[in-house]
């Protein structure tokens, strides 16, 4: 059902997509959607959360933590972060942009969701920063706030929008750009 909802939201926009349309395409009742997701904002949140899992059997967040704990080579870890961006951005960034645009249109629920997902993403980047600093993988003088800000910027939907959607880069090229940006600013 989430795949059907995702396709409708991305093809029609948040505002133009109705629960009735989603339910009809997914072969469920509108009541099912409301009971399980609470409406359109809950559906979008579920789609966004699903996009963060990645494409492998182990969720991307768990793989990221494992990579950080096992890292002995900072450059190899930055390359891994770049690969995570190239894996997650094609699924997550379009939904973040949908949330952003719906929030900008005045939808209060989506504005609250935008704040929530941005805050959660920043907290995750702060977690990453603390991990790599604790492992001694960043250059001296880079504090956790600076590292978190660099991680936050390189995982932004706006970067994906600019380079992939507008400029035609592949997700893999974006990942290499992120790798280089992380190296240049943190190592």
Image (cartoon, helix red, strand yellow):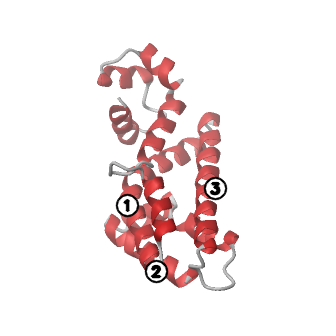
Q: What count of labels does the image hold?
A: 3
- The image shows residue 13, relative to residue 133, as above or below, that is above
Could you say which is closer to the camera, residue 25 or residue 116? 116
Look at 45% across and 81% down and name the residue there.
75
Q: Report the residue marked by disc 3.
A: 123
Mark 2 secondary-structure assignment: loop
Q: Residues within 10 Å of mark 2 (few under 14, many from 20)?
A: few
Give whichever of 165, 27 is nearer the camera.
Answer: 27
Locate the N terminus and report the quarter of the image it occupies.
Answer: top left
> Depth-wise, is mark 1 or mark 2 nearer the camera?
2
**CA distance separating discs 1 and 3:** 26 Å
The local secondary structure at tag 1 comes to: helix
- Where in the figure is residue 129, as x and y percent of width and height? 61, 68
User: How far across and how far down the image is residue 92, in percent?
Assistant: 43, 51
Residue picked out by circle 1: 165
Q: Which mark is residue 111?
A: none
Q: Is residue 32 above or below residue 176?
A: above
Q: CA distance from mark 2 to mark 3?
A: 24 Å
Q: Nearer the viewer, residue 79 or 43?
A: 79
Q: Position of residue 164 (x, y in %)?
A: 37, 64
Q: Is residue 185 left or right of residue 17?
A: right
């Amino acid at each position: 059902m989430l795949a059907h909802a995702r396709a409708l939201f991305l093809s029609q926009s948040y505002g133009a997509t109705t629960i009735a349309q989603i339910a009809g395409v997914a072969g469920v009742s509108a009541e099912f959607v409301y009971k399980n997701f609470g409406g359109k904002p809950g559906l979008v949140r579920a789609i966004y959360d699903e996009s963060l899992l990645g494409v492998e059997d182990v969720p991307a967040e768990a793989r990221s933590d494992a990579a950080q704990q096992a890292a002995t080579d900072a450059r190899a870890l930055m390359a891994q972060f770049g690969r995570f961006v190239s894996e997650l951005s094609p699924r997550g960034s379009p939904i973040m942009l949908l949330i952003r645009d719906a929030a900008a249109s005045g939808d209060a629920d989506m504005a609250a969701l935008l704040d929530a997902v941005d805050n959660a993403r920043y907290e995750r980047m702060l977690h990453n920063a603390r991990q790599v600093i604790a492992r001694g993988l960043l250059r001296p003088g880079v504090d956790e706030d600076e590292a978190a800000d660099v991680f936050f910027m390189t995982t932004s939907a706006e970067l994906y929008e600019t380079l992939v959607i507008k400029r035609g880069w592949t997700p893999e090229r974006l990942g290499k750009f992120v790798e280089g940006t992380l190296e240049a600013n943190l190592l």
